[in-house]
Every structure is written in C-alpha cells, then in structure tokens.
Amino acid sequence: MNQKSTIVIEVVVYNIISAFKAQEGGADRVELCDNPADGGTTPSYGTLAQVRQNLSIDVFAMIRPRGGDFFYSNYEYHAMRHDIEMCKRLGADGVVLGILHPDGTLDRERCKRLVDYARPLKVTCHRAFDMTHDPFETLEACIDVGFDRILTAGQQPKAVDGVGCIAELVSRARGRIIIIPGSGVNESTVGEIVSKTGVREIHVSATRFSESVMAHRNNAISTLGSTEGSEYKIRSVDPDRVRKIRLSAEMKSA
C-alpha cells in the first residue's frame, strides 16, 4: 500500500492483464472476479494463482458461485467453502462474499461460518448488502458476523446516488467496520463521494477496452454466447484512470 496515501484504492479486475494494469496505476488492492456480465463470480484457481504470484499488492478474491440472487443452496454453500480453502492455499489476502435469506436479511449463521473459516484472510461483504431490506440493520449484522468491510452503493445503482446512505453507514459504523463505496466510482464522481461520506477506501473499475490482436476474424459471429462485449475487444484497466481517480479522491479527503 502507498504509505503516503490517505485513500485506499481497490480495483475490481476480471482477468490477469487487468490486475497487472491496476497495480501499474498505483492500486492498493485488486478484487479478482470472473464474469463481469453477472456482476462478478469466483475466478478460476489458475487465474488467482497467476495474479497472486505476479502482484505485490493485496489480492481479494470473489466467492460467488453464480450470478443472480444471493440465496444459495447447500451445494452452493459448500462450493463457496471449497473456494475459500483454495484461496487460502493460493495465498490470497482476502475474500469477498455474502449470503442472504429470501426475506432480504443477512444469513448470519452461514456468513459467520464462512468468515470464521476464511481467517486469517480479510473478508468483505459484497453488494449483496445492497439487496437487503434494511441497510442499517444489516450493518449491525455484518459487524456481529465479523466482516471487515462492506462494499456498497448505498442501496442505489451508483454510489454517487447513495451518498446519503453511505455517509450514515460510516457514521453508525463508528470505526467498527470499513465502508467502501463501489459502482460508478470514477474520475467525475469520486470527489463528491469522498467529501460527502468521509470514506477512506474506494472501489473502482477504471475500465478500458482494447482491440484484439487477432488478424483473422469471422465477421459472421459477433460474440460467442453472451451478447455482452465481443471476441475482438479485451477488457482491461486503464492505469491513468486509476491515477486520476486517486488524485481526485485525495484532493477531497479531509
């Protein structure tokens, strides 16, 4: 981590090259995921191993067995437990997870089991938090369970729209847990988010797409399977955007 920095920058990445670019831009930590179209799922063990071996900054891995809601079967729960075990073996610094009940409350029992099992890794409650029925009740539940951080947009699509809720979460947390805004945090919005909430960590994507190096292209097929993206565009991170986001954030931090 940059010792001179007053703001911790976490960059969400979906492939190996993005992790390298995030570090190049001065990120303090990456959140490694797969499947951006689903909002992030558990990365492959091979990808995690390569990222961990080649980065000097912290690596947190998403523990989410599928896209969709955050209510999981026992089979999915045990898959999450196995994934946490592999993250520990591969040297991850933290994991990111969350399980809900159908009524929109945090599944304290199963979350606590996973948090306890993950130690000594750090554990973040991801944006399942934003799908709960009461953010302030869930804040206390996350603290009771033992989460170290909550990733949230203040129960809004974008964090800049949820600054009131985020600020209240920071106030009510009273230093017992870290609140980290995410979703739509960029060069244009980070200053307002930091100044209005008082957060000291932020979660960004700083996305950049680059053209594939493929010379041969089958123009009859624009994408294999998903309608998101293209086989001829590669998702990555823009190091300059990471630097600009940090500068904007630190200019507004008290």
Image (cartoon, helix red, strand yellow):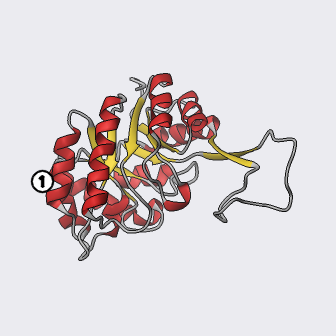
Residue closest to the far front: 75
Give residue 61's position: percent from left, percent from top. 39, 42
Percent x, y of residue 197: 35, 54
Q: Is residue 154 left or right of residue 32?
A: left
Residue 175 can be seen in this image: no
Residue farthest toward the bottom in the current orientation of the protein: 103
Q: Is residue 14 visible?
A: yes
Most foreground residue, 16 or 27? 16
Task: Determine the image quadrant of residue 206.
Answer: top right
Residue found 64% across the figure and 39% down from its top = 238
Q: Position of residue 153 (x, y in %)?
A: 40, 60
To which residue does mark 1 refer? 144
Q: How many labels were placed on the picture?
A: 1
Picture residue at 58% right of the left edge, 38% below the top: 18
Residue drawn at 72 percent across, 56 percent down:
230
Question: Is 93 in front, or is 222?
Answer: 222
Question: Is 14 positioned to the left or the right of 104 in the image?
Answer: right
For numbered disc 1, what is the local secondary structure? helix
| Residue 162 percent across, percent down from the top left | 40, 65
Crowding around mark 1 (Cα neighbors within 10 Å: few <14, some 14 to 19, many 20+) is few
**Is residue 244 found left or right of 68 in the rendered image?**
right
Q: Amino acid at mark 1?
A: Asp
